[in-house]
Image: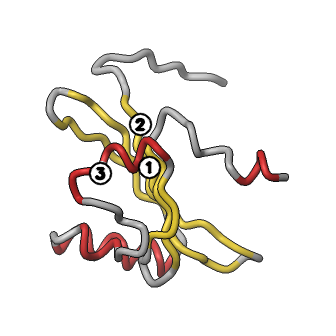
């Protein structure tokens, strides 16, 4: 079971998890390296890291509805896909998880039937 719990520790994607109050309680190694310039964010509130009205509204909406928010960014020449979604415990929204992964600027897209 321990391996199943620690699956994200050494992933090549940044994984950050918070509770329903927005308090970050888990960051894998890639996330810690990505945000190292801000110090240790464990115990910090997600809302303190996201200052725009749009971002704060998205956090509130995801926590309320259990939804998902997906988008791409280009930061310092690196393209990333950001996948933010609610996580659940016993069918109840328990917080949010964000997975940030580097993606190629051009990549194949397949339509499967």
The reply to whether callout 1 and callout 2 are in contact (CB within 8 Å) is yes
Describe the colour scheme in one phrase: secondary structure
Q: Where is residue 43 shown, x and y percent of the image?
A: 42, 75
Q: Is residue 15 visible?
A: yes
Q: Which residue is mark 3?
A: 35
Point out the frontmost of discs 1 and 2: 2
Secondary structure under tag 3 reads loop
* Mark toward the start of the polypeptide (1 vs 2): 1
Q: CA distance from mark 1 to mark 2?
A: 9 Å
Q: Looking at the image, is 94 positioned above or below residue 101?
A: below
Query: What residue is drawn where x is 39% and y is 17%?
Result: 107
**Of the numbered discs in the image, which one, if any, rests on residue 83?**
1
| Residue lying farthest to the right in this orientation | 1
Left or right: where does residue 79 sit relative to residue 19?
left
Q: Which residue is mark 2?
A: 101
- If the image is split into quadrants, where does the C terminus sit? top right
Dot 3 alpha-carbon crowd within 10 angstroms: few under 14, some 14 to 19, many 20 or more: few
* Number of numbered discs overlaid on the protein picture: 3
Query: What residue is drawn where x is 33% and y is 46%?
Result: 71
Dot 1 alpha-carbon crowd within 10 angstroms: few under 14, some 14 to 19, many 20 or more: some
Q: Looking at the image, is 86 positioned above or below residue 9?
A: below
* Mark toward the start of the polypeptide (1 vs 3): 3
């Amino acid at each position: 079971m321990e391996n199943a719990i620690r699956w994200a520790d050494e992933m090549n994607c940044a994984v950050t998890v918070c509770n329903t109050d927005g308090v970050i309680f888990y960051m894998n190694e890639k996330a810690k390296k990505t945000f190292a310039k801000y110090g240790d964010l464990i115990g910090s509130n997600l809302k303190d890291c996201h200052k725009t009205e749009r971002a704060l509204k998205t956090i509130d909406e995801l926590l309320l509805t259990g939804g998902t928010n997906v988008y791409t960014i280009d930061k310092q020449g690196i393209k990333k896909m950001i996948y933010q979604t609610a996580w659940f415990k016993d069918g109840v929204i328990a917080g949010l998880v964000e997975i940030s992964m580097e993606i190629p600027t051009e990549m194949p897209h397949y339509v499967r039937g």
